[in-house]
Image: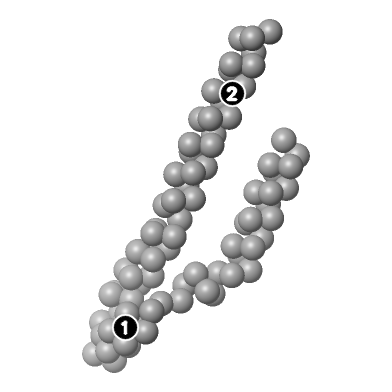
Amino acid sequence: MKFAIRSFSLILVFMAAYLPDVLAQCAMCRATIENNVSNGDTTVGAGLNMGILYLFAAPYLLAMVIGYFWYKNAKMKKKISY
């Protein structure tokens, strides 16, 4: 269990270290956002950033939920076998 906690902590540290890279956008999206901001519309950029973060986080959250249920199921099976 200590290994899992250390691994999870290490992953969080690396994610925090690369946060500026996570918030980066492609050149085409950036040009569109800059054009909208120069025209006074700032809501599109915030929405796009949230969409990028959502797409980044969704697979990891799904894997964590599946891992949690897998762990609970394995723990329950181990209890029953004794």
70 and 6: which is toward the camera: 70
- Quarter of the image where one finds residue 71: top right
What SS does tag 2 mark?
helix
Q: Is residue 66 above or below residue 22?
A: above
Residue indicated by mark 2 = 74
Q: Amino acid at mark 2?
A: Ala
Residue indicated by mark 1 = 28
**What is the CA distance from the residue labelled 1 to the residue labelled 2?**
46 Å
**N-terminal of the two: label 1 or label 2?**
1
Residue furthest to the right:
2
Q: What percent of the width, then of the height, locates residue 74?
A: 59, 23
Q: State how many labels appear.
A: 2
Determine whether, in the image, residue 30 is placed left or right of residue 40.
right
- The answer to whether residue 37 is seen in the rendering is no
Q: What percent of the width, then of the height, locates residue 30?
A: 35, 83
Determine whether, in the image, residue 70 is placed left or right of residue 41.
right
Which residue shows up at 66% across the image and 60% down it? 13
Q: Which mark is residue 70?
A: none
Q: Quadrant of the C terminus?
A: top right
Q: What percent of the width, then of the height, locates residue 68?
A: 54, 34
What SS does tag 1 mark?
helix
42 and 59: which is toward the camera: 59
Q: Are marks 1 and 2 in contact (CB under 8 Å)?
A: no
